[in-house]
Structures are given as C-alpha cells and as structure tokens.
Image (cartoon, rainbow, N blue to C red):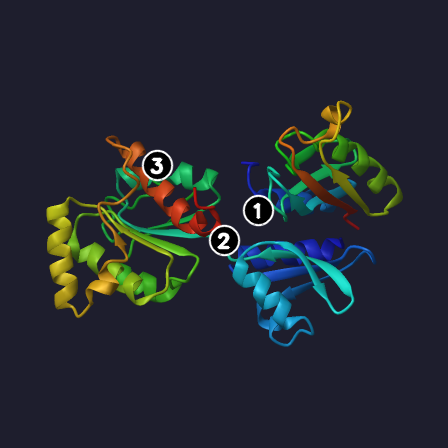
Amino acid sequence: MISTETDILRAAEDWARAGRGVAIATVVETWGSAPRPAGSHLVIDGAGNFLGSVSGGCVEGAVVAEAADVIADGKARLLEFGVADEAAWQVGLSCGGRIKVYVEKVN
Amino acid sequence: MELSTLAALNEERQARRAAVLVSDLSAGTQRLVKQAAIAGDPLADVLERQLRSGKSGMVEAGDRSYFLTVQAPHPRVVVTGAVHISQAMAPMARALDLDLVVIDPRTAFATPERFPDVTLLAEWPEETIGRIGLDAYTAFVALTHDPKIDDPGLVAALRSDCFYIGALGSRKTHGRRLERLTEAGFEASATSRIHAPIGLDIGAVSPAEIALAILAEIVATLRGPRRKPA
C-alpha cells in the first residue's frame, strides 16, 4: 500500500537506508482550493521514482524535476505554484489554488 | 532532513505518540519535539495549539516563522466481533490508514486465517481494553450482537474519550442495550454517544457494504470538524 503518509515517510527512510538519494517535498502553505493540505508529502529518489502527492497530480512532475537538483546539491528549495496563465497549465494548479512546497534532501 | 530525524518521526508514529517537527525553512534547520517534551519547549504554546488543531502549518514565533509538521497518533478502530463485517472492514481500514484491532474471545471466530495481517486478540474485551486503552484517536465498534462481549466494550468506550462509538443491531436490540446501560448507571447524555443504527444510511446490505457505511461514519466523525458548512 503506497497511499498513506505513513507508508510514504517509511519508504523515504527505507530508501535512504538503502543508499538511494532521497528528497522529501512537503506542502507548507496553501491558498484557495488547494487539493492537498499543508503537511502532505511527496518523496522522490535520485532516479525520479516518487510516492505520495503534493497536489492532485498537477505539479508533481515539476517537483520531481526540482528534487533531482536538491538531491544533487543538497540545498533545500521553496517552490510556489499557482495558476496564472496558459503556460501555467504545464506546471500549475487547474483548480485555481496556490501552494508552496518545501523540497529537502534526506542526509 | 537528517535521516535520524526522519527515523525518529516514523518511530513516534509507530508507537502512537504525538510529535511535532519544527522546520525553520529560511535557515534550513529542523528539530523533532516529542509529546513528552512539548510542555518544556521554548515554543510550547505554539506547539500545543498546533497539535490540538491536528493540522500541519506555518506559524510565527518571535521574529521567525516555522513550518510545523504535526503528527498526531494514528486513528485506530477497535472492534468487538471477529465476524464477517469486520473481515470485510480489514482491507478497507488498511486503505484508509486506520489501524484495526479486532477483539473476540470466541476462538472459532478469532482465527488468523480469517484475519490475516490484522491485530487479532482472542480475549474478553474488558481485559484487552484495560490493557490497550481507548484514547481520543480511537473509534470503538461493537459488532457481535452478543451483550456478553459487546457490553463490556461499550462500557469501557463510554468511560473513555474515544472519538466514535458505534454498535450494530436493530432499533429493538439497541433499545434493550440502552436499558442495560442505563441500569449500569449511564445517563442518556452518555449513551447518546453511541451511533445506532450504526453507519451512514446508504442502504447497506452485504457485510462489505455495512463495513463501508461504518468506516464512512467514522471518517465523517474524525474529519467532520474540517468540513465547511454548506
């Protein structure tokens, strides 16, 4: 089962212990009709495998891409997503909400 | 996040203890405050308020802002009755991240073959519940139809601050149950905590549908305060 926060943080620990590079993304702020509440997690490994979610699937791709940089240089990043224009369709929230996502490496 | 911090967070959750992870996002620093250490923490007031809300979120304290990851104990469902409905409930509870504990002293019912991967206790409820306790993150469900097994569980649940109490049975059965509980000294204000007939009214017929109705009612009670009025 990979549908719950329990499994997600447990998987992050297991992956890190297995020597995989791991980043944890956490929703830290939401405005409007954000699909996942603050505290929701997405965990990503160096190969781009991921578990969990920080949105309804709208911005996960962008978070996974940023996570690769976080795993590579070890620097945490604070990302913000909203829906503003056509381009945002690619990496935005179609529901009209806005979210901030903190991405950090597991050391 | 340090791996040791992540491991400690997982360990506290496993042990049903509350914890708050305090992250200073601008400094990139973190510390885990376990339940027992909250009262003595410099941010005690803020941490306690956030823990009571049950939600993670940003807070301001002093001239800094922190993200607090709140980890409240895992919601748990304690059931009396290793019956067909609780068998159907097991995989659903797992999918919902609810820990399921099934209690039934009848060893013909409480077999590991019928309940794989479930915490199954072939004991009388009074002794089991005295040991495991019913906390504010626990739902209690009585499913045996047998007062000898269900009533001691309900009595323990009514004396606890568990967030949900439900009992299976017709209105007539529940009427007799209320009479017994009243005789045992419970006021109507206490017995009214019992959801009966149990479960959301979805016209459930099969054991799986009844299990769904019960779990839906438990989730509604757990998450209800988060819902906005229509």
Determine the secondary structure under disc 3. helix
Image x and y of residue B38, in percent? 61, 71
Tell me if residue A86 comes above or below residue A6 in the rendering: above
Chain letter of disc 2 in the image: B
Chain letter of disc 3 in the image: B
Nearest to the observer: residue B214 or residue A73: B214
Q: Is residue B183 visible?
A: yes
B81 left or right of B46? left
- For disc 1, the neighbor class at 10 Å (few under 14, some 14 to 19, many from 20) is some
Quarter of the picture holding the C terminus of chain B = top left
Q: Which residue is mark 2?
A: B74
Marks 1 & 2 on one chain: no
Which label was assigned to residue A6? Answer: 1
- For disc 2, the neighbor class at 10 Å (few under 14, some 14 to 19, many from 20) is some
A4 left or right of A14? left
Image x and y of residue B187, in percent? 20, 67
Q: Are marks 1 and 2 in contact (CB under 8 Å)?
A: yes
In this view, the residue farthest toward the bottom is B40
Residue at image x 71%, y 57%?
Answer: B5
Nearest to the observer: residue B112 or residue A29: A29
Q: Amino acid at mark 3?
A: Leu
Which label was assigned to residue B212? Answer: 3
Tell me if residue B205 comes above or below residue B38 in the rendering: above
